Structures are given as structure tokens and as C-alpha cells.
Image (cartoon, coloured by chain):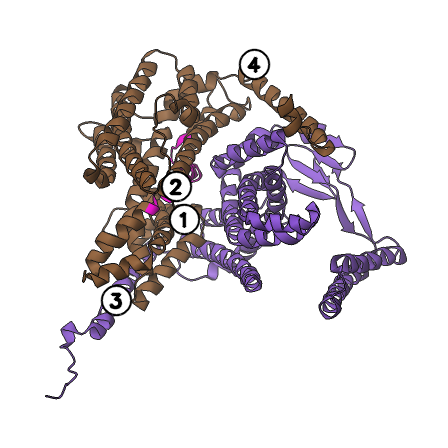
Chain colours: A purple, B brown
């Protein structure tokens, strides 16, 4: 008898069943989404709200504290201000939180008992608090209790602290040749990178020490200093000063911006400190011993053996914390800083349609989250390739 | 002396660091002590303690929150006892030394919670709450011991005890002339939302996680989109969406649900995405050999999932679930941003009462609320770390 491969009947054929199941599932999902969307359109029609995005071109009708935004500008511009503020807080916050977090993480591994304890107390206290409470506390119990602007305290003329604005000294371009100097600095950075790449090649070819940081930094420094003198000092330290009830010049931060930034930084830094500590401890002890056996100095051991491996472990969880910080910036809603969420709510409050505004709000955060995820994935992949 | 030399002054740099940090810590401790015992006026907390705890709950019905608290304490105690005993068994099988938890080790393990209770009692103005708190504590402690004595084969029903207890607490609060959840507030609302959120989000998250591991591409894609979308947006934007749009998404004939329910829907959807990722981690941690062995025994797809994979996966995710619960509990403060009457909102309103307005008393109330969250979160995260070592999560 010849063996005949017979197909089972369709209702028992796994291939058919798989397709059928997926079709059913897809149909179910589509049905639910259509139902919700249909309800949305019906409801909006009933109360006479528009379902398009024309409202973006209407005047916003509200002002935004601490920016040049005027009520006559369009809703679209308001969204742009909101997302710019979110990016500003998230960007600066990520840099500062990383610096503080790495510092605390390293301190918590110190051989000094007191330093270790201090770092642990800091981490365990703030990590277990709701971020919203941290933000509200920093705003209402710290920043708002600062002296009023009329009796603002100045520290060495470099910092002005008041409960309304905090002014920091910041570098600023000044004078006619400012643009030229900025361009020159950009070229300097390019040149520095080129030199660093060249040194890396030399190192690969001959084995001579590359010293690329020294070379690249040197080139940049020379360009910056020579250019500064040649162009007559176009970059100055801009000191804040009080004009009436405003702080002008320098880097003037509004009270709620400062509160949000400080709160996010000190909160996220605790998580980063834990990641840094964990990753350094996760590096195999044999590596340290091997470095000692090779008579590397303790700096060399850290720089060439421990940190590169710890960094590799730390990147994915760090990326997670950067995402969290960005999303937590939406908590500024509670203290009235006009980042994306607060701006969207104000826009809705001014009679613009909620569904579209919320769609823009969510799209904004999704784009931010996905771009952070993209960048860190790239970094991660590069590091992993080096690994093995 | 020798200890100080070895740990504080073993190098010149460390000597300097010790002096600098010691000075700073001493200064901070001094400032804090003077704030707590001298300069802070705690009257605002003392007078508003009930408001902070249960919001505007009908003052004649206060026995209901107490009864609910008792039921919750007993059911949580039972569940914790069962999970703890199961974890100790696992640790014993793995050859770890298992120190028996005793009454003497309790202060070291739970000092933040004990401190919290002492602080709360210090704020009360009558004697009754002290005894009631003590009663709840004793009942909870007895429940833990009872939970540990439950026969091993019944332990896997531990979560049912907890869910039943939670439902029972709601019934006690609401049924027969009680207060429906729209009238709840204060810490009580935070706890309710946190428990309800995790209980409802877990099954949903489990389904999404299974969908993500499905061999059917369409199912997998839908699940990935769901997870990535809800993890990519902040919870607050979902809460806003729930407040403003759930009414729009339902047919005009249906009445939109109340504010509390809307917030709960947003939280459940948000949490389920995170729980799905946690459960997926647990599913991936089950060695392939387990599934292959089950297949070799001729078990069906369903009973492999039900009897082999899920029990191991779910046991491995308990610590991570505790962590997720902590972050959910902290996230319930976001109800403040959508003006529900949660504990943070209450603390904000107290500072505008006639007697206290304009005195900058946020600096007094907020630390109290913060301490509450801190004590609960810190002790829970310590317990979950302990559980993690016992269950050997991440150790092969």
C-alpha cells in the first residue's frame, strides 16, 4: 500500500486553524477600535465639536508664564512651546541626573564608612518617595519659601536666588563677531574629532599610545583660545542682575522650572546611583584581580578594566531611567510649569477639542520615548558588538 | 578606635572626606531634629489626621474603614504568611540557610513601619485609635503565623485569600448604607486604587504577556503595540484622557462612569502593560527543557502552560510584582493632578484652611505624607529583596 499524505480535514488542519484564529483575533480588535471611534465621532457631532485639526491655526488665547508666548499666537505654537519645554527639562535633567547619580554611585562604594552611609541614606530616602511628592515639596516647601525678589539673596554676584526666578551665571555670546566665533567653535569640534580619529588610526597601526582625548581636547582648546583673543572676546560670562521684579541676563529660571528640574534630578539620580553601584559590583572580581596582577594602578584598573565593562551592563537600565525622567516631567502639571501636558490641558481648557489635543500629547511623548529608546539601543548594540 | 582608623581615616583623602561628610551629616541631622521637635507646628496634621486618612468619609460611619482595615490586615497577613512559607521551602530546597522569622527579628525588618505607626499614634488626639491600631496589628500578626501553618498544597490559593479580603473590605465600606467609592478620599482612596489596580491589571497583563509569546504573528504584533504604546506615554496623560474622553468613547445611551472608576480604568490599562513585561520575563526564565520534557510526556499545549510553565513563571515574578505594586502605590498620588480627593490633594487643601492658610505649612504636611509613602515603600521593597534571594530569581 503506497503511503499517501492526506491532508486532515480543514477544521482539524493546524495551518488552516492558525490563519482562522488570527483572522478572528484581528477582526475582534478592529471591531472594538471601530466601535470606540464610531462612538467618538457620533458624540463629537452631537455636541458640535470639530473632528479635524483646524484648531491648530486658531489663536491660543492664553499666555505662558516665563516665555515670550503671546495670546495672539496660534495653538500650534503653544504646542511647540510645550514640547520644547519638555525637551529642555528632560535633556538638562538627564545630563545632571547622570552626573549626580554617577557621583553618588561611586561614593556608595567608597571605603569610607561615613561616605558610604551618607550615600545610602540619600538613595534609600528619595527612591522610596513618590516623584510627585518630591516635585510638589521642592516647589512649595523649598523654592516658594525663598526670599522674595525684592530681597533676593546674591551669592558672590554669580547666583541670584528668589522665590520667583533663580538666576545663574552662564556663558553667552556677545558682540558683532559672536556668530563667527560660534562657527569657529563648531569647526574646532570637527577638527578635534578628526584629530582623535587620526590618533586612533595611528594607535591601531603602530601601537603607539593614542592619547586621543588629550590631542582632541588640545586642538579644541587652542582654537577656542586663539579665536577668543583674535575676535576680541566674543564669549563672556553673563551675570544675572535684578531689573525691577525680573532677573535678566545669565540663565534665569522660573521658580517652577527650577523646582521641576531639581526634583527630577535628585529623584532620578538615586536610581542611577543604584545602577552604577550595581554594575560596578557586577564586574567579575577576577577582572580586578587580573588587573592587580598586571600591576595596573588603581586609576588604570578603573579606567581600562572595570568601567568599560560596568558601562556595558549599565546602559539598558540607564536608558530606562532616562525614559522615566522624560515621562515624569509630565508631573509638572501639579506645579504649573508649561511643559507638554500642562500646555495641552490649558489648550483644552480654552475650548479646543480634547480628543485631537490628547492625540497630539500622546504622540509627542511617544516620539520622545521612542527616540530615546532608539539612541540607547544604538549605543547598546555598539557596546555589545565590542563585547564578543 | 581601630574601627575608626580602618573605616574612616585609612588615607588622607578619606580623612578629609570623613570630616566633610561628618560635618554635613551632623548639620543635616541637627536641622532635622530642630525642625521635627522645635520649629514645626504639627497642629495642622493633628487636627486633620482623620481627613488625611479617610477624606470626607461619613464621620458617623468611621467603624467601616476600621473594619475594612482589619479585614485587609488579616487577608494580607494570611497571604504573606503563605507566600513566605512557600519561599522558605524553595530556599531550603536550594540549600540556603533559612533563618526563622521571629518576633525578635521583626523590629529590625519592619522598623520603618513601626516608626510610621508610632508617628501616627503620636498624632492622634484620643486613645481609641491607638488600641484599634494595636488590635489590627495583632490580628495581622496572628494571620501571618496562621498563613505559615497552612498546608503546603493549599498555599497556591494564597492570592485568592487576598482578593477575597479586598472584596470583603469594599463590601464592608459600601454595603448596607455605607459610602460608595465616589465618596472615598484620603489615604484610603490611594490604597483602594492601588489594590484594585494591581488585582485587575494582573489578569489583563498575563493575557497580554501570553499574547506576546504567542506563535501567531497577528496576536503578537497587537500585543507588542499595546505594550509599547502604554509604556511610552506617561500615566498622567492616560488619566487626563480617561477623565476627558471615556464619556466620548462610549455610546451616547450609556452614562459615563464616575471619576474614580475612570481613573481606575486608566491605571489598570497602564499597569497591565508593565505587568505584561514582568510576566514575560518570568515566562522566559522557565528553562526550555521544562517544556520539552512536558511535550515528551505527551501533555497538551494547554496543560503544559497551566501546570508546568505558569506555576514556575508566576513564582519567579512575585518580587517584581511587589516592586510594581510599590510604584503603583506611589503613582496613586497622581490622582492629585486630576483633582480626585487623594491624600496629596487632602494635604494641599488643609494648608488653605482658615486656621492654617498662608503660613507655608506645606513644609509640615508634605513631609508627613511623604513619610507615609516612604515607610510603606521602603519596608515592602526590603521584603521583596528578601523574597528574591529566597526564591533565587535570576540565579540558575
> Magenta segment range?
B316-343
Residue on which disc 3 sits: A27
Residue on which disc 1 sits: B394
Mark toward the start of the polypeptide (2 vs 1) = 2
Can marks 4 and 3 be said to lie on one chain? no
Can marks 4 and 1 be said to lie on one chain? yes
Residue B207 in the image: state x and y as whole percent: 28, 54
Residue B68 in the image: state x and y as whole percent: 26, 27
- The residue closer to the viewer here, A105 or B352, is A105
Q: Nearer the viewer, mark 3 or mark 2?
A: 2
Mark toward the start of the polypeptide (4 vs 2) = 4
Asked if the residues shown at circle 3 and circle 2 are in contact, with their CB atoms under 8 angstroms apart, the answer is: no
Mark number displayed over residue B388: 2
Q: Is residue A346 above or below residue B305?
A: above
Residue B341 in the image: state x and y as whole percent: 38, 32
Distance from disc 3 to disc 1, alpha carbons, whole Å, reads: 39 Å
SS of the residue at dot 4? helix
Asked if the residues shown at circle 4 and circle 3 are in contact, with their CB atoms under 8 angstroms apart, the answer is: no
Image quadrant containing the N terminus of chain B: top right
Q: Nearer the viewer, mark 3 or mark 1?
A: 1
Residue on which disc 4 sits: B38
Subunit bearing disc 2: B
Outermost residue, top direction? B127
Distance from disc 2 to disc 1, alpha carbons, whole Å, reads: 9 Å
Asked if the residues shown at circle 4 and circle 2 are in contact, with their CB atoms under 8 angstroms apart, the answer is: no
Q: Is residue B378 above or below residue B41?
A: below
Residue at x 52%, y 56% (from the top left corner):
A368
Q: Residues within 10 Å of mark 2 (few under 14, many from 20)?
A: some
Asked if the residues shown at circle 2 and circle 1 are in contact, with their CB atoms under 8 angstroms apart, the answer is: yes
SS of the residue at dot 2? helix
Residue at x 47%, y 61% (from the top left corner):
A54
Subunit bearing disc 1: B
Amino acid at each position: 500500500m503506497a503511503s499517501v499524505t492526506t491532508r486532515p480535514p480543514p477544521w482539524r488542519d493546524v495551518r488552516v486553524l492558525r490563519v482562522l484564529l488570527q483572522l478572528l483575533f484581528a477582526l475582534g480588535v478592529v471591531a472594538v477600535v471601530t466601535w470606540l471611534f464610531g462612538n467618538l465621532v457620533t458624540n463629537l457631532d452631537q455636541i458640535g465639536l470639530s473632528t479635524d485639526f483646524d484648531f491648530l491655526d486658531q489663536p491660543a488665547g492664553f499666555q505662558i508664564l516665563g516665555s515670550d508666548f503671546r495670546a495672539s499666537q496660534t495653538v500650534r505654537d503653544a504646542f511647540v512651546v510645550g514640547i520644547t519645554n519638555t525637551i529642555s527639562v528632560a535633556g538638562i535633567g538627564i545630563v545632571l541626573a547622570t552626573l549626580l547619580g554617577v557621583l553618588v554611585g561611586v561614593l556608595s562604594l567608597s571605603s569610607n564608612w561615613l561616605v558610604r552611609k551618607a550615600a545610602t541614606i540619600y538613595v534609600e530616602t528619595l527612591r522610596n518617595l513618590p516623584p510627585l511628592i518630591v516635585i510638589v515639596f521642592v516647589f512649595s516647601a523649598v523654592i516658594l519659601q525663598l526670599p522674595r525678589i525684592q530681597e533676593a539673596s546674591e551669592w558672590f554676584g554669580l547666583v541670584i536666588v528668589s522665590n520667583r526666578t533663580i538666576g545663574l551665571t552662564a556663558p553667552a555670546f556677545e558682540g558683532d563677531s559672536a556668530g563667527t566665533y560660534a562657527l569657529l567653535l563648531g569647526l574646532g569640534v570637527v577638527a578635534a574629532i578628526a584629530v582623535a580619529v587620526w590618533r586612533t588610526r595611528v594607535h591601531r597601526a603602530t601601537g603607539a599610545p593614542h592619547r586621543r582625548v588629550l590631542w582632541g581636547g588640545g586642538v579644541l582648546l587652542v582654537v577656542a583660545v586663539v579665536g577668543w583673543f583674535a575676535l576680541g572676546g566674543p564669549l563672556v560670562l553673563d551675570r544675572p542682575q535684578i531689573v525691577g521684579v525680573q532677573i535678566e541676563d545669565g540663565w534665569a529660571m522660573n521658580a517652577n522650572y527650577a523646582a521641576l528640574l531639581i526634583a527630577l534630578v535628585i529623584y532620578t539620580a538615586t536610581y542611577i546611583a543604584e545602577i552604577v553601584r550595581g554594575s560596578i559590583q557586577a564586574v567579575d572580581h577576577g577582572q580586578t584581580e587580573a588587573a592587580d596582577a598586571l600591576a595596573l594602578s588603581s586609576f588604570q584598573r578603573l579606567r581600562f578594566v572595570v568601567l568599560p565593562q560596568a558601562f556595558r551592563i549599565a546602559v539598558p537600565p540607564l536608558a530606562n531611567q532616562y525614559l522615566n525622567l522624560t515621562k515624569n516631567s509630565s508631573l509638572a502639571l501639579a506645579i504649573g510649569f508649561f511643559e507638554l501636558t500642562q500646555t495641552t490641558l490649558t489648550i483644552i481648557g480654552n475650548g479646543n477639542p480634547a480628543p485631537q489635543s490628547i492625540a497630539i500629547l500622546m504622540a509627542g511623548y511617544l516620539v520622545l520615548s521612542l527616540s530615546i529608546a532608539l539612541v540607547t539601543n544604538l549605543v547598546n548594540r555598539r557596546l555589545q558588538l565590542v563585547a564578543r | 578606635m581601630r574601627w575608626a582608623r580602618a573605616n574612616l581615616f585609612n588615607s588622607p583623602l578619606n580623612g578629609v572626606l570623613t570630616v566633610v561628610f561628618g560635618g554635613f551629616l551632623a548639620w543635616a541631622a541637627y536641622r532635622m531634629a530642630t525642625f521635627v521637635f522645635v520649629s514645626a507646628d504639627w497642629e495642622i496634621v493633628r487636627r486633620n489626621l482623620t481627613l488625611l486618612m479617610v477624606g470626607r468619609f461619613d464621620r458617623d460611619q468611621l467603624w467601616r474603614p476600621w473594619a475594612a482595615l482589619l479585614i485587609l490586615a488579616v487577608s494580607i497577613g494570611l497571604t504573606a504568611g503563605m507566600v513566605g512559607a512557600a519561599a522558605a521551602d524553595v530556599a531550603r530546597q536550594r540549600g540556603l540557610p533559612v533563618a526563622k522569622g521571629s518576633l525578635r527579628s521583626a523590629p529590625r525588618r519592619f522598623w520603618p513601619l513601626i516608626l510610621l505607626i508610632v508617628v501616627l499614634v503620636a498624632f492622634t488626639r484620643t486613645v481609641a485609635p491607638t488600641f484599634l491600631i494595636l488590635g489590627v496589628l495583632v490580628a495581622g500578626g496572628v494571620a501571618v503565623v496562621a498563613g505559615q501553618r497552612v498546608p503546603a498544597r493549599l498555599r497556591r490559593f494564597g492570592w485568592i485569600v487576598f482578593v477575597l479580603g479586598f472584596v470583603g473590605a469594599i463590601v464592608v465600606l459600601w454595603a448596607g448604607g455605607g459610602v460608595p467609592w465616589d465618596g472615598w478620599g484620603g489615604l484610603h482612596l490611594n490604597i483602594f486604587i492601588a489594590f484594585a489596580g494591581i488585582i485587575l491589571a494582573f489578569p489583563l497583563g498575563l493575557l497580554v504577556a501570553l499574547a506576546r509569546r504567542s506563535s501567531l504573528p497577528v496576536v503578537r504584533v497587537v500585543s507588542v503595540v499595546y505594550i509599547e504604546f502604554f509604556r511610552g506615554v506617561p500615566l498622567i496623560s492616560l488619566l487626563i484622557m480617561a477623565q476627558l474622553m471615556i464619556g466620548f468613547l462610549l455610546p451616547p445611551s450609556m452614562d459615563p462612569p464616575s471619576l474614580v472608576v475612570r481613573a481606575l480604568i486608566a491605571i489598570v490599562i497602564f499597569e497591565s502593560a508593565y505587568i505584561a513585561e514582568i510576566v514575560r520575563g518570568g515566562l522566559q526564565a522557565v528553562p526550555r527543557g521544562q517544556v520539552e520534557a512536558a511535550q515528551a510526556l505527551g501533555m497538551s499545549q494547554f496543560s503544559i502552560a497551566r501546570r508546568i510553565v505558569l506555576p514556575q513563571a508566576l513564582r519567579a515574578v512575585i518580587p517584581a510584582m511587589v516592586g510594581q505594586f510599590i510604584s503603583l502605590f506611589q503613582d496613586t498620588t497622581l490622582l492629585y493632578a486630576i483633582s480626585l480627593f487623594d491624600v496629596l490633594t487632602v494635604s494641599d487643601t488643609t494648608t488653605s484652611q482658615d486656621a492654617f492658610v498662608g503660613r507655608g505649612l506645606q513644609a509640615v504636611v508634605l513631609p508627613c505624607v511623604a513619610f507615609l509613602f516612604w515607610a510603606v515603600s521602603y519596608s515592602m521593597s526590603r521584603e521583596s529583596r528578601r523574597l528574591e534571594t529566597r526564591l533565587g530569581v535570576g540565579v540558575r
